[in-house]
Image: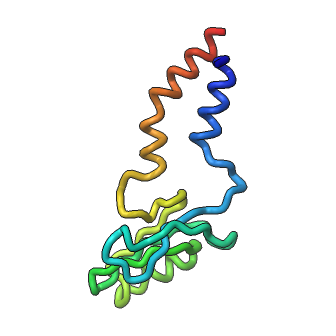
Amino acid sequence: MDGRLWMLVVLVMVFPIATSALRCVNCKGCSKFEDSQAVTCPSSADRCLKLHLPSGLINRECGDEKTCVDKSNDRDRFLAVHCCETNICNGGSRWTSSGSCLALLPLLATSFRSFFRY
């Protein structure tokens, strides 16, 4: 495969298209990550939330900046509130899409080197 075509394929796979909607994990009162599912958020939602409840359960949902601030200030209902802005970033693991991108850095470096050799 031509080095430039390979580079284009890699870039399209690594960097999401800006117009695509945010995807978040969604569940109410989950005890395990397996109880949740990924959903496409409405256009008004630009954040994924992970809410730790006093019961030990977790809520995961789509939201916006105001929702994050409001829920962060509601310490009676939520022990911890995590807000993030990348796809599926409110999942069960700290290994997120940014971690996946870091794992692809060696491939990108090799591709760039091949690209500029031609």
Relative placement, left or right, of 34 versus 17 is left
Q: Quadrant of residue 6?
A: top right
> Residue at coordinates 68% horizontally, 21% vertically from top-left?
4
Of residues 47 and 118, the one nearer the viewer is 118
For the rendered model, the colour scheme is rainbow
Q: Is residue 56 above or below residue 106?
A: below
Residue drawn 36% across and 56% down? 94
Instruction: Give the x, y percent position of residue 30.
Output: 36, 78
- Quarter holding the C terminus is top right
Residue 47: give x, y in percent of width and height: 55, 67
* Res. 13 image quadrant: top right
Location of the N terminus (image quadrant): top right
- Residue 109 is situated, as x and y percent measured from the top left of the image, at 51, 24
Q: Nearer the viewer, residue 61 or 84?
A: 61
Identify the residue at image location x=28%, y=86%. 55
Q: Residue furthest right?
A: 19
Q: Is residue 87 above or below residue 32?
A: above
Rendering coords of residue 56 (x, y %): 27, 81
Residue at the extreme bottom = 76
Say which quarter of the image contains residue 36. bottom left
Number of labelled discs?
0
* In-image side of 17 versus 47 (left or right): right
